[in-house]
């Protein structure tokens, strides 16, 4: 199965969803959406403030686009364009085959990925590279809290139980962020945490995960 970079939606049939699948109750929560909007507006305010110094330092370290975008799969397999501050060299995606994958399963991770720039390493450790995703949250493609947003090639290899992750909106943070961040290298463990989030979900649990994420990001725990 192949996907084009400008894909807008993956049909339910193409990703294995059938009549037995349903949308998680969190998707219909007005309170969750209100928290998302408020959080996104605050986050975008910070993003605007930090964008200029980030852009200047980035050009000195590794000239090229300030923002990086990629098509990801969201709720019910709908595709959307995710945004980040660029943390890798230009056209890093084309060089992925040259880097060893240290993760297990349908994800790609390398602790010492040579494609990451010096400044990009700082952006990742501090999670500053993720701030443009507040725009995705405001648009409704993502939520502040949810599951890790998968890539198209990852979803193309999913087995049936993996599609449970797509019952909720992907999140800027979630169980994987609180319980390990980049140190979690087993895909099945990530899936397990994403499904666990769906089972535990409540408005108060979302607030708890947001708070825990802030603490973890400030201490730079588990990021590389």
Image (tube, grey):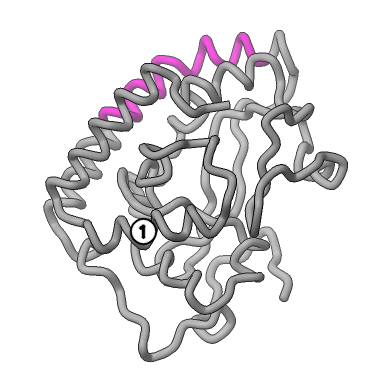
Q: Is residue 47 magenta?
A: yes
Residue in the picture at 65% in, 53% down: 104
Q: Is residue 119 above or below residue 12?
A: above
Whole-percent x and y of residue 41?
27, 33
Tell me the chief SS of the magenta region.
helix
Residue in the picture at 52% in, 10% down: 53
Q: Is residue 217 above or below residue 22?
A: above
Task: Classify residue 212 as left or right of residue 82.
Answer: left
Q: Is residue 87 magenta?
A: no
**Label 1: few (<14), some (14–19) or many (≥20) C-alpha neighbours in 10 Å:** many
Residue in the picture at 52% in, 79% down: 160
Say if residue 134 shows up in the picture. no
* Quadrant holding the N terminus: bottom right
Q: Quadrant of residue 101?
A: top right
Query: In terms of secondary structure, where does tag 1 sit?
Result: loop
Which residue is label 1 attached to? 169
* Quadrant holding the C terminus: top right
Q: Quadrant of residue 133?
A: top left
Say if residue 87 shows up in the picture. yes
Magenta stretch in the rendered image:
42-58
Whole-percent x and y of residue 21?
36, 82
Task: Classify residue 139 as left or right of residue 94.
Answer: left
Residue in the picture at 52% in, 21% down: 125
């Amino acid at each position: 199965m192949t996907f084009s970079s400008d894909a807008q939606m993956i049909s339910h049939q193409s990703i294995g969803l059938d009549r037995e699948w349903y949308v998680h109750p969190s998707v219909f929560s007005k309170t969750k959406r209100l928290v998302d909007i408020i959080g996104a507006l605050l986050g975008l305010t910070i993003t605007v403030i930090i964008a200029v110094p980030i852009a200047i330092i980035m050009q000195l370290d590794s000239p090229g686009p300030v923002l990086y975008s990629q098509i990801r799969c969201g709720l019910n397999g709908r595709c959307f364009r995710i945004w980040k501050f660029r943390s890798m060299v230009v056209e890093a995606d084309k060089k992925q085959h040259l880097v060893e994958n240290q993760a297990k399963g349908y994800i790609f991770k390398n602790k010492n990925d040579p494609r990451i720039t010096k400044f990009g390493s700082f952006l990742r450790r501090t999670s500053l590279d993720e701030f443009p995703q507040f725009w995705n949250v405001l648009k409704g493609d993502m939520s502040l809290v949810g599951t890790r947003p998968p890539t198209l090639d990852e979803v193309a290899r999913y087995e049936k139980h993996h599609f449970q992750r797509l019952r909720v909106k992907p999140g800027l943070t979630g169980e994987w962020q609180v319980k390990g961040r980049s140190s979690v290298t087993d895909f099945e463990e990530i899936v397990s945490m994403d499904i666990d989030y769906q089972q535990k979900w409540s408005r108060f649990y979302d607030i708890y995960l947001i708070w825990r994420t802030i603490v973890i990001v400030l201490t730079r725990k588990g990021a590389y």
